[in-house]
Image (tube, rainbow, N blue to C red):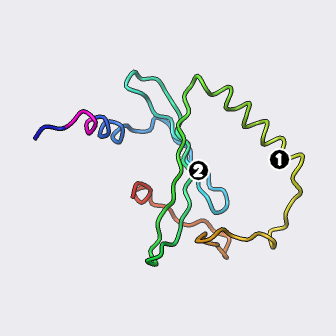
Amino acid sequence: MIESMDNRDDLEKNEREEIFSRVVKAGKRTYFFDVKATRNNEYFLTVTESKKRLGKDGKFYFEKHKIFLYKEDFEKFMEGLNDVVDYISKNQEVIPRAEYQPEENELVDTNNEYASLDFEDLDK
């Protein structure tokens, strides 16, 4: 069987291992910061936000959002991120926890504990 070039590229991308990873649990979300390498061995960063959701069928799934950040963009990205975080810190009033309304289909952890995550579930 002959594999197309696109399929081989996809397999290579999926098989690349993280060079360095950091997991940050933040309330209802988990963030994954993963350092990977291009074919030319240039490092880049993937940032993945993961949220556990309840599907219409009653089964849980993980909703993921991912961005890719390359070394040449780090400085501008950090400047922009620092600017908006600083702005929010200075201008947003603190909203008491009791007033928080979860988004539709968002799981609310009444025990204030983190859900256990299985890394294999994140790729489903």
Q: In this view, does 35 lie above or below 109?
A: above
Instruction: Give residue 47's position: percent from left, percent from top.
Output: 56, 43
Q: What residue type is labelled 2?
A: Tyr
Please tell me whether the stretch drawn in magenta is mainly helix, strand or loop: helix
Position of residue 52 relative to residue 122, above or below, is below
Question: How many labels, in total?
Answer: 2
Image quarter of the C terminus: bottom left
Q: Which quadrant holds the N terminus? A: top left
Crowding at dot 1, Cα within 10 Å, few <14 / some 14-19 / many 20+, comes out as: few
Residue range (magenta): 4-8
> Is residue 117 found left or right of 3 in the rendered image?
right
The residue most toward the left is 1
Judged left or right of residue 37, residue 82 is right
Disc 1 residue type? Ile
Q: Which residue sits at x=47%, y=76%?
A: 56
Image location (x, y in percent) of residue 104: 62, 71
Q: In which quarter of the image is residue 95?
A: bottom right
Camera-nearest residue between 6 and 58? 6
Provide the secondary structure element on which disc 2 rests.
strand
Crowding at mark 2 (Cα within 10 Å: few <14, some 14-19, many 20+): some
Measured in 3D between alpha carbons, the distance from the residue under mark 1 to the one under mark 2, in whole angstroms, is 20 Å
Q: Which residue is drawn at 63% across and 69% down?
A: 113
* Sooner in the amino-acid sequence: mark 1 or mark 2: 2
The numbered mark at residue 31 is 2
- Quadrant of residue 26 within the rendered picture: bottom right
Q: Say whether residue 65 is magenta.
A: no
For this view, does 86 lie left or right of residue 105?
Answer: right
Disc 1: which residue? 88
Position above or below: 121 against 110: above
Discs 1, 2 touching: Cβ within 8 Å: no
* Residue 93 drawn at (x, y percent): 89, 56
> Residue shown at 59%/55% (left/top)?
30
